[in-house]
């Protein structure tokens, strides 16, 4: 069964460093998302991406965050200058068609630890 | 604002028994969807079951079924014949047809006792 894959599974970075989290969505999917889950808290929506542009973003997704689809298969989340509070599990997801009516499939997550 | 509440941080059930996980939500939207996702130790979020709000019939997927009470804004998950592989965090999520994001509950940790 096709899967959303994410790399790295775990990354430790120093505060102030730039981090890029990578995702390969399911191949025929057109909508892409990032969510995050801070330890002990709810899963939170960050951003959705369609047709090479951001379609919706949350208040969390401020100027330190950016997303990109650099080629036909990868979808990346960049955090420019990491803060301690960015430590979280970051989930990439994709859907074949418009959310929410189309099922959103999630990857296994990338655990980011900022020290 | 839309919210999702899961009031049970942890539930345990004997293998082969039935367990029900609770979820309530708040919304003023008329067109929306509700979901249960499972997160096993492997961390991947796996869709268990989904319910369209306009459908009166409760969704069923094999051993998993929901009790959708639209007026009460309640969406519980029933797992029948619990198996050891069902042990996981279970998240209830809501999505309005008018936007792109899922709103999540805090999760319920399900423990299966052999």
Image (cartoon, rainbow, N blue to C red):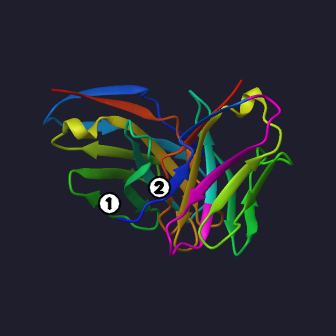
**According to the image, label 1 marks what residue?**
B59
Mark 1 crowd level (few <14, some 14–19, many ≥20, 10 Å Cα): some
Q: Is residue B38 left or right of residue B82?
A: right
Q: Residue at x 79, y 46 (%)?
A: A59
Q: Is residue B101 visible?
A: no
**According to the image, label 2 marks what residue?**
B34
- Position of A26 relative to B43 (above/below): below
Residue A40 inside the magenta-drawn segment: no
Q: Residue at x 40, y 59 (%)?
A: B50
Q: Residue B55: horizontal and vertical position, in percent? A: 40, 67
Residue in front for this viewpoint, A60 or B19? A60
Q: Residue A60's quadrant in the figure?
A: top right
- Distance Cα–Cα, label 1 vs label 2: 10 Å
**Quarter occupied by the N terminus of chain A:** bottom left
Q: Secondary structure at mark 1?
A: loop
**Quarter occupied by the C terminus of chain A:** top right
Q: Residue at x 78, y 35 (%)?
A: A82
Mark 1–mark 2 CB contact (< 8 Å): no
Mark 2 crowd level (few <14, some 14–19, many ≥20, 10 Å Cα): many
Q: Is residue B83 left or right of residue A112?
A: left
Residue A20 inside the magenta-drawn segment: yes
Residue in front for this viewpoint, B11 or A31? A31
> From which residue to which does the magenta span run?
A14-32
Q: Chain of mark 1?
A: B
Residue in front for this viewpoint, A104 or A1? A1
Q: Is residue A17 visible?
A: yes
Q: Is residue A22 left or right of residue B81?
A: right
């Amino acid at each position: 069964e096709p899967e959303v894959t994410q790399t790295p599974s775990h990354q430790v970075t120093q505060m102030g460093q730039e981090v890029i989290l990578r995702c390969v969505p399911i191949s025929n999917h057109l909508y892409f998302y990032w969510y995050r889950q801070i330890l002990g808290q709810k899963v939170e929506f960050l951003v959705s991406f369609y047709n090479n542009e951001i379609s919706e973003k949350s208040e969390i997704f401020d100027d330190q965050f950016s997303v990109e689809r650099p080629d036909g298969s990868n979808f990346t989340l960049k955090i420019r200058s990491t803060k301690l509070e960015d430590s979280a599990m970051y989930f990439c997801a994709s859907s074949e068609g418009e959310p929410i009516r189309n099922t959103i499939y999630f990857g296994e997550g990338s655990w980011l630890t900022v020290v | 604002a839309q919210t999702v509440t899961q009031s049970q941080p942890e539930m345990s059930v004997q293998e082969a028994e039935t367990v029900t996980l609770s979820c309530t939500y708040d919304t003023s939207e008329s067109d929306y969807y509700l979901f249960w996702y499972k997160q096993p130790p492997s961390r991947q979020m796996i869709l268990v079951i989904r319910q369209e709000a306009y459908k009166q019939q409760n969704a069923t997927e094999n051993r998993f079924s929901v009790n959708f009470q639209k007026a009460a804004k309640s969406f519980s998950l029933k797992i029948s014949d619990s198996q050891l592989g069902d042990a996981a965090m279970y998240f209830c999520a809501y999505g309005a047809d008018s936007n792109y994001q899922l709103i999540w509950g805090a999760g319920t940790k399900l423990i299966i006792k052999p």
